[in-house]
Image: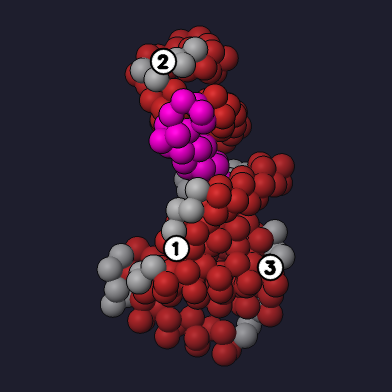
Amino acid sequence: MEARALDLLEREGPAAAIAFLEGQMDDPLAAAQAFSGLARHAYNQRKDVDLMIRLAQAGIEFALRASLDATERDADLAYDLSGAAKGLNYDLSANTWPGWADDGIALTAEQMALGCAAAHKNLELAGILDKGDLPLSRARWLVGAHHLAAREFEPARAAFRAAAEQARAAATPGEALLSEGYAQITNLAERGDDAEAGAGLQALLAELRRHEDGEFFARQLETARRIFAGG
């Protein structure tokens, strides 16, 4: 299904691909997953943020509509479709955050505003679907990330602290340190050359590198510091 939709996207454009997937009501979960695949293709291969947003938003609307339709006849399917909508919101939001420094991607203020709204929707769905501490931690981190990009420092700090607390509850200390690192970057972005925050971040990076995925997370924090705090 995804391959057919991708072929339509490349040959006939997004309207044809969207119409094809919206017609796949015999397997709506596969269609929702195909929307996700096409949105990733638009971002990763085509470097087209507007196209990614269009496909992700169409997928979100389709998944939520199909979930509502399935509620009374198949509760598990309805839950999975709502989960697919959550995932599409997460991806849309992550791909409209400027903290990755991805090659070939230039974001507008309007695109980032859409991403911030999607981050809040992702957090809302994580709570409604009772996804647990780690997904909630990541959802709160993403909300904080968008607040940081908008230079809304206090809500960014609050979101990062909540994300760290839920990561600890999920027994994922590396992700807790990651969110704590973003809180330190928020302090640096707000206060400029803050020696205490800078030293705290360096100590945190050293500790983080001792954890699973720590080197990957540390590089992520170093990139974010460069972008948001000029360091």
Q: Position of residue 86 (x, y in %)?
A: 51, 43
- Residue 136's place in the image compared with 97, above or below, is below
20 up-or-down from 33: above or below = above
- Amino acid found under the numbered disc labelled 1: Asp
Above or below, comparing residue 181 to residue 3 in the picture: below
**Horizontal and vertical percent position of residue 125:** 56, 47
Mark in front: 3 vs 1: 1
Q: Position of residue 188 (x, y in %)?
A: 61, 77
Q: Amino acid at mark 2?
A: Asp
For residue 77: magenta? yes
x, y percentage for residue 198? 53, 83
The tag earlier along the polypeptide, 2 or 3, is 2
- Asked if the magenta segment contains residue 83, the reply would be yes
Identify the residue at horizontal 29%, vertical 73% (top origin): 211
- Furthest residue in direction front, as rendered: 72
Q: Magenta stretch?
A: 70-94
Q: At 52% across and 67% down in the image, what residue appears?
A: 163
